[in-house]
Image (tube, helix red, strand yellow):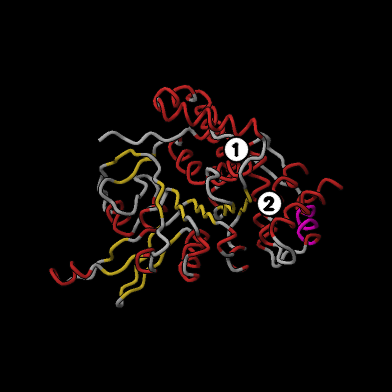
Amino acid sequence: MRDKIIYPFVAIVGQEKMKEGLILNVINPTLSGILIRGEKGTAKSTAVRALAEILPEIEVVANCPFQCHPGDKNLMCPPCRERLERGEEFEVERRKIRVIDLPISATEDRVVGTMDLEHALKKGEKRMEPGILAAAHRGILYVDEVNLLDDHVVDVLLDAAAMGVNTVEREGVSFTHPSRFILVGTMNPEEGELRPQLLDRFGLCVNIEGLRDPSLRVEIIKRRSKFDENPVAFVQGWEDESKKLVESIRQATELYSQQVEIDEAMLREIVHICLDVGVDGHRADIIMQKVARTICAYRRRKEVVREDVEYAAQFALPHRVRRRPFEEMAGNIEERLRKQ
């Protein structure tokens, strides 16, 4: 069967904050994901799938349900680690990064995994059946309408995203496996809000809406029409831009992990901004410095400057301020930074 052709990420018109927020999470997966708040029909799902489509393929252990990395012990499930310690050689497959969808109706067992009852009945052995968190390892976990999920399931997702591991305890059996993924949640605020405690656990948050500029809306129609008429030719036309973006992400990832520094003055600036806008706790400060360093790397610099900190605030703070509505607070943060 012919593979479905995905609309190019670089061809999406507007929504720059959303696109940059996704890119920052690819560069630095420790940012704890991104929450995209906005109305339907604003390219949220398209952007997620399009970005995954252009990212380089990854190597996985063949036939392993946990998407284990064949060369990194820290990214292996217990059975694969045991095989590695015994000196076994893995059969390796290369494949694209997966986008795993989480249904709104998903139960905790479906998310974290459960006992394989059929195997237990047939062979008398206890074995774990992997859940969605296993499938999402080293990929992207996409949760549409995250505000409609059961709060306990959201807690489980956010814990796994923050810790990078998933622990399943069922019927006297405890099983832990790596679960490092980019968490992308989307929601329409008109359908209800997340609890403040859950909002705070998302590293980044952006608020998006349909474009109001008539010329940009016309451009959206033109591009979508060309894609629908001849998707192969349309994707090929954006191939050079896609390659440039992938190379920028690769360079930024390498730069972030090795060379980006943030000095005491910028750390103090982050703390002052967080105190000034009235966020609770310390998670905002920690995430904001990570975002600032990631932005710095994406801009191909080695030392964080005030501009990076100010831009990081627009991703890391609005959803953490509980004193005013999200949209009002987002605007006030930008206004406050401009006045400084």
Q: What x and y, as percent, mark residue 184?
A: 51, 52
Q: Quadrant of residue 325?
A: bottom right
Q: Is residue 291 above or below residue 199?
A: above
Residue nearest the observer in this picture, 183 or 17: 17
Residue nearest the observer in this picture, 282 or 131: 131
Q: What x and y, as percent, mark residue 253?
A: 55, 39
Q: Which residue is mark 2?
A: 289
Q: Quadrant of residue 102?
A: bottom left
Closer to the eye: label 2 or 1? 2
Q: What x and y, as percent, mark residue 96?
A: 38, 39
Magenta stretch bounds: 268-275
Identify the residue at the far bottom of this view: 172
Categorize mark 2 by other alpha carbons within 10 Å: few (<14), some (14-19), many (20+). many
Q: Which mark is residue 255?
A: 1
Residue nearest the observer in this picture, 319 or 214: 214
Disc 2/disc 1 C-alpha distance (Å): 16 Å
- Left or right of 211? Residue 307 is right
Count of numbered circles in the view: 2
Identify the residue at horizontal 48%, vertical 39% (top origin): 51
The dominant secondary structure in magenta is helix
Q: Is residue 281 above or below residue 140?
A: below
Mark 2–mark 1 CB contact (< 8 Å):
no
Identify the residue at the far left of this view: 122
- Left or right of 297? Residue 161 is left
Q: Quadrant of the N terminus?
A: top left
Q: What x and y, as percent, mark residue 218?
A: 59, 30
